[in-house]
Image (cartoon, rainbow, N blue to C red):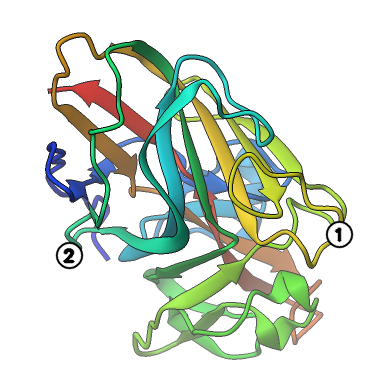
Amino acid sequence: MTPVKSMPSIITKNPSINLACFLATSFLSLAANTAYAVSCTANTTLSSLLGSTSQNECTVTPDFVKIGVYQFGICTSMPTNTDVSMCDFFLSSNNSTILTLGINSSGTLEGASQDAIEQKVYTHATMVIDNAIFLKDSFQFDTAQKSSDGQQGAICWTNGKPNGFLTDSPVDNGVTCGSTDEAVETEASYKYFGVSGNYFASVTNSLGTTNNYTLVQGLAPSPVATNDDNGSHIFMAQEMKTPIDMTGNPDLDISFKVTDAAKLTFYNGVYCTDTGNACVGNIEVNTIDLKVTIK
């Protein structure tokens, strides 16, 4: 895996909007921890992470991240899951449109258009996406690592298993380590943000502005989830670093971050098959950071 993965960013007034990645430091942080993790290196270990950052995780750049998008728009003030009246939408549909972000993907959001965007000054962005997010990744270490499922090797990859946070079983975690790269697309299904019953998270993104995430029951406006099972969608609202003045209806350049968009989590025996030793426990999507500029 290369240290940085990026691709051109193109958006037009055509029915399809091309969106791509920009180099920043965070993607969709659906866990309770909002601190930035350091990038993984070939010699990263749990002890080195704890000694340098007091955290048990480091970021990696996935081959791709795939999300199902229902609504995507820009707003004149910060929207909420119950009020998006200040927003105009590139896309709003009862059916999700798959958006794949990565070095070998087109980054095209089919059906998206600037037609509904008015000549206003926009300060925020919003998205409603599936609560299931998919990614594929592998990472090469200098020495063999143990994965939570009991396997061992210097290459750790996404294995296609469901997210172990939903079952608390080490054999269900999404990472396996071995001697060859066998990475496959893996689902990270977030029923809640960090712990059961916590359906909201607010983080500072890589642009220095605020991202709000709410687990909701449907398209916006929508009530917040009331239990772990009825949170079918994730509502995202982000403050943009620079307001967008759409006077004259200019073309936009929209980009999402892919570099360091996921994080590997290490455990000290807990959630490891071999409870006496540290292991690479899981992989999570980090945060969705969105950048909108005028061409």
Q: Residue sitting at 73 percent across and 51 percent down?
A: 193
Which quadrant of the rendered structure holds the N terminus? bottom left
The residue where tag 2 is placed is 104
SS at badge 1:
loop
Q: Residue under label 1, please give it.
A: 227
Q: Residues within 10 Å of mark 1 (few under 14, many from 20)?
A: some
| Label 2 crowd bin: few (<14), some (14–19), many (20+), radius 10 Å | few
Expressed as whole percent of the image width and height from the top left, the position of residue 131 reads 60, 61
Task: Give the residue type that dot 1 points to.
Answer: Asn
Q: Which of marks 2 and 1 is nearer the N terminus?
A: 2
Residue at horizontal 17 percent and vertical 48 percent from the top:
15
Quarter where residue 250 is shown: top left
Query: Quick one: SS at disc 2?
Result: loop
Q: In this view, does 293 lie above or below 227?
A: above
Q: Residue 40, can we see it? A: no
Q: Do the residues labelled 2 and 1 touch (CB within 8 Å)?
A: no
The residue nearer to you, when weighing 15 against 266, is 15
Q: Please say if 263 is above or below 75.
A: below
The x and y percentages for residue 198 are 83, 47
Any part of residue 222 in sight: yes
- Coordinates of residue 184 in the picture (x, y in percent): 39, 83
Within the image, what quadrant is residue 220 found in?
top right
Q: Is residue 163 left or right of residue 182?
A: right
Is 189 displayed left or right of 289 in the figure? right
| Numbered disc total | 2
